[in-house]
Image (cartoon, coloured by chain):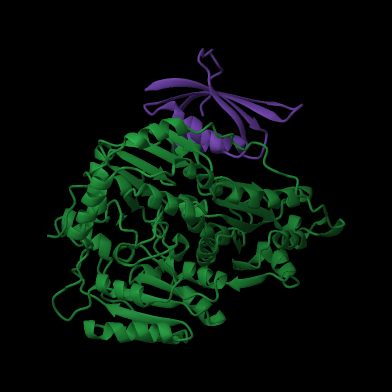
Chain colours: A green, B purple
Amino acid sequence: MTESKTLTGSALLFEVLKEHGVQHVFGYPGGAIMPIYDALYDSDVKHFLCRHEQGAAFSAVGYARAAGKVGVCFATSGPGATNLITGLADALADSIPIVAITGQVPTSAMGSDAFQEIDIFGLSLACTKHSFQVTDINDLEEVLYQAFEIALEGRHGPVLVDIPKDIQLAAVTQRFDKLSHLKNKVKLPLADISKALELLTHAKQPILYVGGGVGMASAIDEVREFANKTGMPSVSTLKGLGAINPDNDNYLGMLGMHGTKAANIAVQESDLLVVVGARFDDRVTGKLDEFAPHAKVIHFDIDTAEINKRRTADAAILGDLKGNLPLLTMPLAIKAWQQKVQQMKTDFAWRYDHPGDNIYAPALLKTVSDLMPSNTCVTTDVGQHQMWAAQHMSFDDPSNFLTSGGMGTMGFGLPAAIGAQISRPHDTVIVISGDGSIMMNIQELATIKRYQIPVKIVLIDNAKLGMVRQWQDLFFDGRLSETDLSDNPDFVMLSRAFDIKSQKITKKSEVKAAIEEMLDHDGPYFLQVKIDATENVWPLVPPNTANDKMMEGV
Amino acid sequence: MNKYQLVIMADDKQVVLERILQVTRYRGFLINAMNAEVNTGNNVATITMTVSSDRPISLLIDQINKLIDIKDVKVDASPTKIPQCSA
């Protein structure tokens, strides 16, 4: 315990950040947050000036996801605060612990439509786990402690703290108050272990369905032990990728809309789903009524509200996966089922033999995956390149694959990679982006330039909004509405304007050498990869269709 | 549409009522009537709300329960008439 001392609200903020081990913050200054930026001047916290508040929010998300820590971002009132919203929504959908600090106009001006005043507190209700507005300086310390506690408690999520300018300037005595624990933590009901054991011992064709909750619960070892000991075939959601060792013989890859054929068929034929940290998202289930129609469900989750939300659980096990899953870890007699899924895995394995000289994105991404150093962190944007990365790259930990899952936010990849690289300076960080997505936060190339952040950018360029174009071709009679990007900027010249080494490749024969050059380069690198604009992501489960009725080409 | 009466106990914190209204609307429930009172002795608010939806009430109860300031949510099995408002 340290002695109490008097300081400003802004200085107190940095004391509380220090108490929580925060070393790095992403943000953008402005009028109503100037006292905080003035206190930053005297602080040991390293601040990264992003070039848009959305970039700051996504860098905080990337930082949090890559390092398993709370990400912190700052923005001023009004437009600064509203620019954070997409990042907060993304963090809410993917359960990422973020603390966002926004400046607000002085309390005396609040509610008067003051310059750069917006009700960010009201706006935050739908896009944060919780939010605060501090109108009494004596509440500030407790609120900041609670913000960190809430971000990490139970199912993680973003918390916003709105601090008016006069509160930032007010004098306060720091109490080092660590006793302000949450009062209303939900007491989880007892887990239905005996029912789960009964279901498990009677199952002949069980599947382990792995979600993003596994990494967040730090239960990767327990899930791998369960997969190994039971021998249960496993599938993963987009956010669960990396939780199961990709070399596991019974691991079938991603399920759902762009999942592997083996994963989707196995799930449809299963008689038991053991669901760990996943939530039956619509991109996973396809037509919900026909998803795994013969399967009983054992559902492990930390969030009570996910149980029975989209699929009824026959046994619900609420609470910490790390402690609960070992209770069900035991050998199972499912040899025939294992052989069947392994045969499907062989029969439906990806093929990379592609005619012609043009670069085939799945093969290129597999090459990146094969050549990248161990513990490389890959971020993606959203669209075709994202699904190809999920299908054709291998990850040995969920913190090595950062992608916007629930919100599907284009513009995520570049700033998330910046955050990831800052949290893990000794690991390689690669952004896989598309020519649509990259332009959504292209200004962050200036952040890369300023801090010489050595992220490697692989731009899969088909001069299209490729995923929308694919759907227009397949489901809207080929009426290509507003998906042509053939007037894109010269990306090589653009990167050079930010002092980033760059190269453009167009032929298969150039792929390996270009990837090696990129990975060997010490600083940031921008590799533009031209691909055929007509390539589609396969397989594809069409909307409102059962997962075993996937399209595999046209 | 099924009708339910909920009794919610919450800490009397900033915007707790707005949070309940937002979650109720977003999760697909209409508010037919509501009443909110604060016990100034212990700063606990009691919110009584009649809602209707085709969706199961457990969906809304779980989501309201997730709000940080909520202490308890119950379905009142014997609904009594509560004052109408235009929420």
Q: Can residue A89 be seen from the camera position used here?
A: no
Observer-nearest residue: A487 or B68? B68
Residue A105: x and y in percent read 67, 56
Q: Quadrant of the C terminus of chain A?
A: bottom left
Q: Is residue A151 left or right of residue A372?
A: right
Residue A108: x and y in percent read 73, 51
Residue A123: x and y in percent read 54, 48
Report the number of numbered marks.
Answer: 0
Observer-nearest residue: A150 or B23? A150
Q: Can residue A31 be seen from the camera position used here?
A: yes
From this view, report whether residue A369 is shown above or below residue B52.
below
**Residue A546 quadrant:** top left
> Image point 19% across, 79% down: which residue?
A358
From this view, report whether residue A353 is shown above or below residue A6.
below
Residue A51: x and y in percent read 53, 72
> Image point 39% across, 60% down: which residue?
A245
Q: Quadrant of the N terminus of chain A?
A: bottom right
Q: Is residue A253 left or right of residue B58?
A: left
